[in-house]
Image (tube, rainbow, N blue to C red):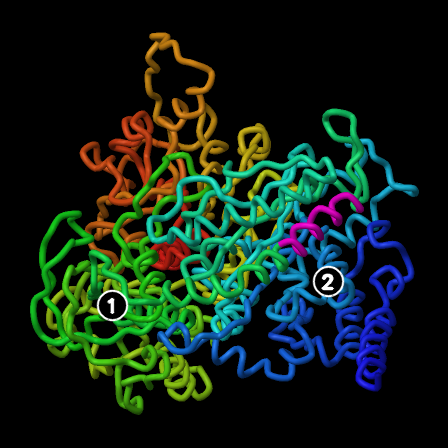
Amino acid sequence: MKRFLLLVTLYLSLFTSAQDLKSPSEFLGYELGTQFTRHHQVVDYYEYLADAASDRVQLKAYGQTNERRPLLLAYISSKENMADLENIRTAHIATTEGNGNPSQAIVWLSYNVHGNESVSTEASMLTVYTLLTEKSDYLKNTVVIMDPCVNPDGRERYVNWYNQYKNTPNNVDPNSKEHHEPWLSGRANHYMFDLNRDWAWLTQIESQQRIKKFNQWLPHVHVDFHEQGVDAPYYFAPAAEPFHEVITDFQRELQVTVGRHHAKYFDANGWFYFTKEIFDLLYPSYGDTYPTYNGSIGMTYEQGGSGRAGLAIETGIGDTLTLTDRIAHHFTTGISTVEVSSQNAERLNTEFKKFYHPKDYRYKSYVLNGDADKIDALTQLLDQHEIKYGFGKKGNIKGYDYKTGKNGSLKTTENSLVVSTEQKKGTLVKVLFEPNAKLSDSLTYDITAWSLPYAYGLDAVASESKTDASSAVNGMSDDPATTSDLSENAYAFLTDWNSFNDAQFLAALQQEGIRVRYAKKPFTMDGIDYDRGSLIITRADNKNQVNFLGRLQESASKHRITLNATGTGFVEGGKDFGSSSVEMVRANRIAVLSGEPTSTLQFGEIWHFFEQQLQYPITVIDSDYMADVDLLEYDVLILPDGEGYTDFMDGDQLKHLKEWVDSGGKLIAMGDALKGLSGENGFEIKAREIEKDSTVNLQSYDDDEREQIKNTISGAIFKTKVDTTHPLAFGYDDSYFSLKLGDNAYEYIKDGTVVYLEADSTRPFAGFAGSEAQKKIGDTLIFGVEEHGEGKVIYMVDNPLFRGFWENGKLFFANSLFMVE
């Protein structure tokens, strides 16, 4: 009897504890779904739960955003599991090495990676509350990790805007302003980057901080909560084809299990949903694919609504979609995910362990040669992913040659980077390094090529045998510079120009006020050959600089630059330093256009490039007042890619731009910005015109979408030719692998075609390009320069800064800023 009373007392104590927790509505003071909750209020609620239920909730900050908002993870489980949390984590990670047989399921739920898909964070609060109360049984064998807001800066931008412009009471009319975000929407982060495309590339501070925690846990299940168009029903797993070939049968199977489980609840409520469409599992940098390639069941859930829905909106069929509805749907799939994971905990553990068993991938090793700075940049990325690598030995490795697209060989040295698939992260290595991902379906949601040897501009061979390599703990980023103390008796200090790191060094010197020259022709000095673009820093140019040598030494050490001192300006071969072939690098005043018609994403790529990578000042000029700006105050103006340039460049706007270029300005036009500069009254650039076949080929309605992909290029990699003598191409070899995102095609520029695609090179080395698109792009421009009066126009048909990860394109952009004069 005493035991019974003790059990009853314990049960009532637990029940009372759960019931004493305040729901989100009780804590916030309004019904969840009637307002958007600001980020600090969300943080307050999670802190409240961590305090009120400290035996079942831990809240830990894993970083800050660019705008200094906290990034948080909440760990939720039973009292017993939380008391043993670190042991649970280490036992789980041990299975990646084939050790142990843990029993708990690890589920990671990520909310609001896109800021204006704002329902996710609201749903997270109801989900965590329910797991701690009426659904606490799921936590007996499950640890849930919740990131309540992956993108606080973007979400706050949306919520603040909505609260400023919504009607009172809110208006469901889709035409009302509250349903039309401005150009600077809340979707992306501070720098306008899409964080859901940055998992693999880690260009953003949010991604860099999150990946550390993700690698500490490597969950069995990861869900990324999203929103889509207002009229779309709910989407959940299983995903659409193409699936990457490395995805296991179990990962496919459990997606179906999860989907059927969700469907049970949606059917009971009469809610509409779809599966197996649109959202595929190929591109490796998503919140579903990246975890999948690390052994998780990675899934995307999409609720209708997004930045248009507000608190409520009338849909295309006359229904009203409310924030409360959207919360209910995301809440249901969140709870259902934890439930089905709990039910399948044993199998999740067994199959996760199997995922990390050794695999017999075709290519056992990827061996890479190239500039030390580029190797270093790549190893820094590998370190963040905890991918092991080593360095080679003198020899010759046979395999698939990335540069030729055929079997070949590569001479190796002790500086050759070797990355093997025979390691814990071997599947991720295969996905990121393989020459060309296998496509089970050409209809994809994103780019179809991303291979890192191409992205980093390295010579590489994929070998079918394991290559001997010395182990390396990390990259070379901490190695000191090899520059010795700089002599006060030197005439000049010299260094080469081969990588983006060299451009960062130059930008740093310019910020220090140190004057730098560059060589337009190759030269030889003190037995060392220097190619075009090499930097020449003379004492005479900097005689009035305070502590010139000390500041130069400090900058060279920071950027790991080797400076060679010389006692004369009289070269052994080539042009002397006083020649007209040696020019001063100008400290250009640079501006970039923002607002309509530019793309927020491409504007963000440029903004981030200057502030976080090059670290060089840039002025942002909005299109609303551009006409009132005296462009003569700037040396360079950048027009990012975007739609609507044809209308934007009306007669006066284009006329003013031409006058500015004519007087010495340098205009850099990217992507669709070229459309606004062509035409009868524009610059020389001309779009490629292809005579269309007038033959009508009858086809079924169902086949129309597949017929259209003949005209598309889904982010494919092409081998282009390079004029290495042109300043825009300084630092490059005679070929460049360009990532093409579409079939835009422009004719060659007379006397200014620098990078181009020849007619016999239109088949991509990697990725998908439709047959008609391939016909269109032969003998067309990639990058070129047009001289116009005293100034220049630089055309970039392809994007050398794409998502911040196409490392080998960045030097082209730096050349356009500093070398092309």
Q: Dominant secondary structure of the magenta stretch?
A: helix
Q: Position of residue 610 (x, y in %)?
A: 50, 61
Nearer to the camera, 87 or 745: 87
Which residue position holds label 1? 420
Nearer to the camera, 722 or 478: 478
Q: Is residue 269 above or below residue 730?
A: above
Which residue ends up furthest to the front in the rendered image? 1
x 16%, y 60%: residue = 463
Nearer to the camera, 310 or 427: 427
Q: Position of residue 809 (x, y in %)?
A: 35, 54
Nearer to the camera, 154 or 675: 154
Q: Position of residue 769 (x, y in %)?
A: 32, 35
Q: Earlier in the sequence, mark 1 or mark 2?
A: 2
Start and end of the magenta stretch? 324-336
Q: How many marks?
A: 2
Q: Is residue 814 left or right of residue 303?
A: left
x 59%, y 38%: residue = 597
Q: Dot 1, crowdedness within 10 Å: few (<14), some or many (≥20)?
A: many
Q: Is residue 156 above or below residue 55?
A: above
Q: Looking at numbered disc 1 in the image, what kind of residue is underneath it?
A: Ser
Q: Is residue 218 above or below residue 398?
A: below
Q: Secondary structure at mark 2?
A: loop
Q: Nearer the viewer, mark 1 or mark 2?
A: 2
Which residue position holds label 2? 135
Q: Residue 266's quadrant in the figure?
A: top right
